[in-house]
Amino acid sequence: MTELPRVAVVGLGFVSSIGNDQQSVAESLRSGRSGIGIHPQLKAANAPVLLAGLIEGFEFPSEFPQSWSWPAHVEIPRTQLRSLAPHGVYAHVALQEALGQAKLDVELLHGEETGLLTASAGSTSLLHSHLERMLSRGVNQCHPFVMTCSIAGTLSFNLAASLGVRGVSGGCVSACASSAQALGLACDQIRLGRQKRMIVVGAEDCDLFSILPFAAFQALTRSTDPSQSPCVFDQRRDGFAATGGAAVLVLEEMTTARARGVSSLAEMVSWGWTSDGYHPMAPEPTGEGLERAMRMALREGRLQPSDISYVNAHATSTPAGDKAEAVALTRVFGSDGPWVSSTKAQTGHALSAAGALEAGISVLALQHGVVPANLNLRDIDPAAESLRLPNVPQSAKLRRVLSNSSGFGGVNVSTIFQTVEE
Amino acid sequence: MNDPFRFASYDSELRQLIVEFHEKPDKALVVPIVRRIINHYQPKERKIPSDAPMDQPLADLGLDSLTLMEVTLDVQDAFQTTFTDEELKGLRSFSEITALIDERIRTLSEGGT
């Protein structure tokens, strides 16, 4: 069998509750600083849940883009801004650092060999406000960008146009597995020789409309103390804290990247993708589908479980989900396994953006030799007791990281990254 | 101006003119308000001067069709009125927009419906 092209990560970008650039995110991972706090919109709405991963440096006080603000170093022309959702603004800011690091200039962005895959759930708040206006004032009073700024796909419509992408473009909509899935599919595009490089963007709004519906099925923590909850793999866990933001990874065929003089931050080795075939929302209790995803990723990378030094778990801090994953991890890695942590207790759950955020965190973990902590973990769930779960950040030389993501519909994705010897 | 954010990005002069119009719907305010709304959407190098011919199609001034829709939305909000489908279809030039507003003001002052 011919060797597949190797895929390098050549750019990273973040807008997250623990930092809006690589350096701040890495520093937060090293110090265990939580990005979770009381969300002002949830508080103002007198919502029964209050905690969320808070994004700093942005304001979206109304549905009118004219009223929005974002970090001043990023320029977004009005003609682009007018059809963006808030998470599109997050994405623009995260792209700035990633594209700069990957040295992607206009010419490369416009080249046929550069593609784009995105993940977001759309903007429920904009959809709501624009449709409400349509119903109350008539369709002629409805904003002409009502669709392109709000429906699932808004991120890819807008970024494909503003970046001038002429290769593949599109989006993944598998809820919380979406951006991990986008990464896997992007990796495949490069390995199949269809594209030389792929920009992968996961992003979500971070407001009442993107967060509160999860409380309708008891998925969100009712705690008001971020030093207690979320607490992944802990017996006391009662739900996650949601967040939004954006994460960007630029993938490139490794020899092409080297020829351009671009550093490889890590190598994307392989990935696995399965479904539970069980329930539209609840995870299958034995974690069998997630286990198959992890084994598929290991097999494709020709790796043994012992080759993995750290697992960035999907665990969100819900009773059912963490347990299913703990059981699956125990079956795959046994009792003498790698470090395991879920950074969602620190960042909040970035929903569609979680896979890309955590893949980015995994790459930083490899680069900086840091194992992020399971913040607030004190009373370990018996189902997770054989896992190696640090509750404070650890320094360790890491060779390979496996990152898990699961979403509605029982979709499971595992991605594997490793350090690159130049 | 019910929603403080609706016109947040307008310059203070334009916001002031809209407030004045709401207090007293004066026909003389229509042209300056509409011109400023259009210019709000125009890049620096394409601002419409006050002596530009009123009946020139806005497309010739570099306004794309989507921007024209944004302009007409803003105009409807600024003058607190609603255009019908037929009216919207006919709007291509500056003078067509201002004529429509003038007509609304006349209806108002005559105590029409």
Image (spheres, rainbow, N blue to C red):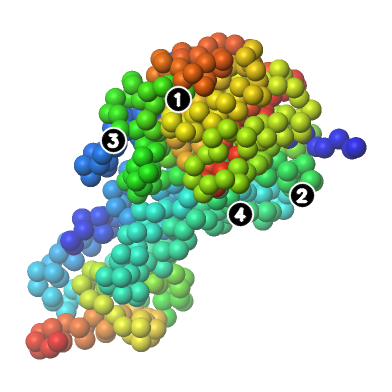
Q: Is residue A225 above or below residue B59?
A: above
Instruction: Looking at the picture, tell me which residue is in the foreground, B3 or A349.
Output: A349
Task: Work out whether B58 lies above or below A293.
Answer: below
Between circles 4 and 3, the one closer to the viewer is 3
- Position of A167 with respect to B3 (left or right) is right
Residue under pointer 3: A50
Chain letter of disc 3? A
**Mark closer to the chain start, 1 or 3:** 3
Tag shown at residue A232: 1
Image mark for residue B44: none
Q: Nearer the viewer, mark 2 or mark 3?
A: 3
Relative to A346, say whether B61 is above or below: below
Q: In this orientation, does residue A321 appear?
A: yes
Chain of the residue that carries numbered disc 2 in the rendered image? A
Which comes before the other along the chain, label 2 or label 4? 4
Mark 2 to mark 4: distance in Å? 15 Å
Task: Tell me, for residue A170, which label it has, or none.
Answer: 4
Location of the N terminus of chain A (image quadrant):
top right
Amino acid type for the residue under numbered disc 3: Leu
Give the residue number, with chain letter if any, for mark 2: A194
Q: Residue placed at 70% from the left, 51% from the top?
A: A111
| Kind of residue at disc 4 | Gly
Q: CA distance from mark 2 to mark 3?
A: 45 Å
Q: In the rendered structure, which disc, 4 or 3, sits on the residue that comes first in sequence?
A: 3
| Mark 4 crowd level (few <14, some 14–19, many ≥20, 10 Å Cα) | some
Question: Counting residues from the N terminus, which is met first, the one under dot 2 or under dot 3?
Answer: 3
Mark 1 vs mark 4, foreground winner is 1
| First in sequence: mark 2 vs mark 1 | 2
Q: Residue A143: image x %, image y %?
A: 37, 66
